[in-house]
Amino acid sequence: MCGIAGMIDFTQDLRTQETICKEMQGAIIRRGPDQNGIFLTEHAALVHTRLCVIDPVSGIQPMSFTDPKQKEIYRMIYNGELYNTPELRKELEEKGCHFRTNSDTEVILQAYAVYGAACVEKFNGIFAFAIWETSQQRLFLARDRIGVKPLFYYQNPDHPALIFGSELKAILKHPDVPHEMDLNGISQVLLFGPGRTPGCGVFRHMHEILPAHCAYYSEKNGLETHCYWKLEAKEHTENFAQTAEHVRFLVTDAIRRQLVSDVPIGTFLSGGLDSSLISSVAAREFQKQGRTLHTFSVDYLDNDKYFQKSKFQPNSDPAYIRIMQEYLHAEHHWTVIDTPQLAAALFQAVEARDLPGMADVDASLLAFCKEIKNHVTVALSGECADELFGGYPWYRDPEIREAYGFPWSQSTDYRLSFAKPEIAELLRNRNDIHREYQNTLARTALLPGESPTEKRMREMMRLNLDWFMQTLLEVNVTKVKNGECQTNTDIFRFLVITSIIFPCHVNHIE
């Protein structure tokens, strides 16, 4: 994982803004402590911090490329992983492209030079990147289909400039960005938290490039955004056996593609279906190479004494983890967390997320990943499989499924009790929860003649993709450098939300 930031301003010479760029860079250095770089020109500033995963020597950014045909110079900063790099690299070489590195960064950069904005339609991966075109004097921004990689921007209508970054804290380091929240921001934190409305940056004039969107920013046209992909409803024509085989291929293909790494890689192992499947496939791939997979599990002190089952977790994990230990023959690592350790991590977790989040989840994951980093740089997780494969109670329980509103947040009365009466009344009158819920349902793709249950299941999928999944993607993890715990965002490769959901972008699947 890496961090990107920058600014475009056609009213001043940004070559004098190196100090500000270093401040922005410092705010996200924990995302990429291995390398960093800054590019400055008259109207564009690009900032990068890098965590090396592929081609540590040659993949330094900002990366530049001069197109000999178009006489255009492109400069790029990138955060992500491209899982179809070999196929796309071969395709570009057949079009006459020559590569200096083995990095996916250069593949994305040259793909943009060849295909322009349409390049994003060819990518199978998770990404947020920015490309500055020197002669055109415009910036191109893009974000992956599901929004695994974050990309925020600040745009004040009273000041013609664009300031962007992987995290809010980087943008807030710019002196022209006030640390202000309006009533909408208060509503997001108090009523929607730990989620937020898609595209909302909570702070005043702060926004987010939506998942599956790209944008151009120029002096003439300002910011122009475009949606390049959307989830569609299509009739399912496969029988059960064909469906099972199709899903098997998509899952295993996604896992294998994400095992490519030039740094140590391991897997989470909770004993559940998702992490067990990923660990099993990864272990087999490692065995073929004569390597041993490292797996990681977390438990809590006295959990066996105090565990209470719920609809979300009917059983405790350790028994299932031990079954998988015996099956995998991997090198397994246990982390046991005590309450004081969780409490201490709460503050770091809030700082990493930039906003209030899922307190216990964020803190425990941060503490867990601090231990993981002692062994590997990248960990594969089964996070977000529940959203795609119906693992939550609101997919299965008819009463919860049919209830009006976001299934994970059924009442706002308690939350409003924390606000001053006059603020609470304003928020009630805005009716934000109802409006955004209805907007989300309106975005749901449906087929004619579907039963009420089928329609509701599609709506539930839309609600989870746009809201609950995004919240989980923002859960923060740790990067430990020289023994110091540093908070980070999205170090994981989230398997089931890349290749699996986009079969048209997986090799030989139509």
Image (cartoon, grey):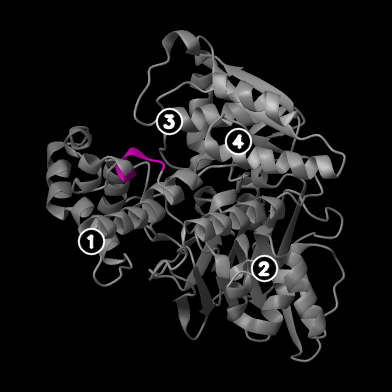
> Label 2, label 4: how many angstroms apart (C-alpha)?
25 Å
Residue ID for mark 4:
276
Secondary-structure class at tag 1: loop
2 horizontally vs 339: left or right: right
Q: Earlier in the sequence, mark 3 or mark 2?
A: 3
280 horizontally vs 165: left or right: right
Secondary-structure class at tag 4: helix
Residue ID for mark 2:
507
Is 262 or 332 nearer to us in this picture?
Answer: 332
- What type is the residue that disc 1 sits on? Ser
Q: Is residue 293 above or below residue 217?
A: above
User: Residue 172 lies in magenta, yes or no?
Assistant: no
205 horizontally vs 507: left or right: left
Residue 363 location (% of width, % of height) = 51, 28
Q: Which residues are magenta?
A: 391-395
Residue ID for mark 1:
451
Residue 457 location (% of width, % of height) = 31, 54
Q: Are marks 4 and 1 in contact (CB under 8 Å)?
A: no
> Label 3, label 2: how many angstroms apart (C-alpha)?
40 Å
Q: Residues within 10 Å of mark 2 (few under 14, many from 20)?
A: few
Residue drawn at x 67%, y 37% is 267
> Label 1, label 2: how many angstroms apart (C-alpha)?
34 Å
